[in-house]
């Protein structure tokens, strides 16, 4: 077996998420056409591309927000093609949203507690916040991990944009998923908040948590990612390490505009 074939076989074995020939049509428009890639366990895989490339649509197909016209989504050996977001979460795959998706009229503590209630396996969703030991323990863990101690009783709607995005990632992690899908997590952030969020995302990747990231900030993607998938006009243009993607002439032409910018 050649070195290339051995590397491909190894990647397949290590894949926690496999997307195969994923396609979706909206009438006569083929928004995503035959996209395939693997995301390795414990790593950060990023999907990038120009506006309209189809990256967010691919993300929605994987997460269950849109049902594919063709192709498969296999997560940790389980075929989840077209499964509902709730089914995805039960299987161990959680997502954040491009537009902040929090209960703005509830406190930080209550947002986290409601998300962590999933761990109670249906027990006590309507119980007072003081009950549900498993959920409350998870809230404590997330508060410490995301440095939210001084914001616990503040309404989510009063947090800064950066704090809201950080809370949303914490909410997505409340159910202890094995894979986290992040959709444009730094959108609208200042440079400082973007760098802080990037460092936090990098720290989250581990053997127990893999990350799939859709992000517009190319420099951030290149600094964070283990593997990068480039979309263009609804198809996969290229994939590989950040270095391989940056040096790919087709990517430089279609995405970066010129070799110098890459």
Image: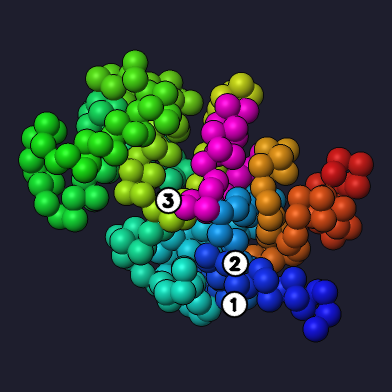
Dot 2 or dot 1, earlier in sequence: 2
Left or right of 5 in this view: 148: left
Residue at 18 percent across and 50 percent down: it is: 120
Q: In front: mark 3 or mark 1?
A: 3
Report the span colored magenta.
195-218
The crowd level at tag 1 (other Cα within 10 Å; few <14, some 14-19, many 20+) is some
Residue 213: image x %, image y %? Answer: 57, 49
Do the residues bearing badges 3 and 1 touch, measured as CB atoms within 8 Å?
A: no
- Secondary element type, mark 2: helix
Do the residues bearing badges 2 and 1 touch, measured as CB atoms within 8 Å?
A: no
Dot 3 or dot 1, earlier in sequence: 1
Q: In front: mark 2 or mark 1?
A: 2
Task: Please tell me how many numbered marks the rendered image carries.
Answer: 3
The reply to whether the magenta stretch includes residue 205 is yes
Residue on which disc 2 sits: 14
Residue 236: image x %, image y %? Answer: 69, 66
- Secondary element type, mark 1: strand
Q: Classify the position of the N terminus by image quarter.
A: bottom right
Residue on which disc 1 sits: 21
Residue 254: image x %, image y %? Answer: 80, 55
Left or right of 200 in this view: 51: right
Q: CA distance from mark 3 to mark 2?
A: 21 Å
Q: Is residue 246 visible?
A: yes
Left or right of 259 in this view: 118: left
Q: CA distance from mark 3 to mark 1?
A: 22 Å
The crowd level at tag 3 (other Cα within 10 Å; few <14, some 14-19, many 20+) is many
């Amino acid at each position: 077996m050649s070195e290339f074939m051995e590397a491909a076989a190894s990647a397949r074995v290590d894949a926690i998420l496999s997307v195969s020939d994923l396609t979706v049509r909206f009438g006569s428009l083929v928004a995503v056409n035959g996209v395939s890639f693997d995301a390795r366990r414990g790593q950060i895989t990023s999907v990038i591309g120009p506006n309209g490339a189809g990256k967010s649509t691919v993300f929605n197909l994987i997460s269950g927000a849109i049902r594919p016209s063709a192709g498969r989504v296999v997560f940790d050996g389980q075929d989840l093609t077209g499964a509902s977001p709730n089914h995805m979460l039960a299987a161990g795959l959680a997502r954040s949203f491009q537009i902040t998706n929090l209960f703005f009229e509830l406190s930080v503590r209550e947002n986290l507690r409601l998300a962590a209630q999933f761990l109670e396996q249906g027990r006590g969703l309507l119980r007072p916040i003081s009950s549900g030991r498993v959920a409350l323990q998870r809230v404590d863990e997330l508060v410490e991990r995301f440095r939210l101690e001084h914001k616990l009783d503040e309404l989510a709607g009063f947090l800064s944009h950066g704090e809201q995005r950080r809370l949303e990632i914490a909410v997505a992690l409340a159910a202890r998923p094995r894979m986290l899908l992040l959709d444009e997590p730094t959108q609208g952030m200042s440079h400082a908040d973007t760098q802080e969020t990037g460092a936090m995302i990098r720290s989250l990747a581990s053997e127990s948590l893999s990350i799939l990231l859709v992000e517009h900030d190319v420099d951030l993607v290149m600094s964070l990612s283990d593997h990068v998938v480039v979309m263009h006009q609804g198809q996969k243009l290229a994939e590989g390490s950040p270095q391989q993607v940056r040096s790919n002439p087709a990517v430089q032409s279609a995405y970066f505009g010129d070799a110098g910018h890459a």
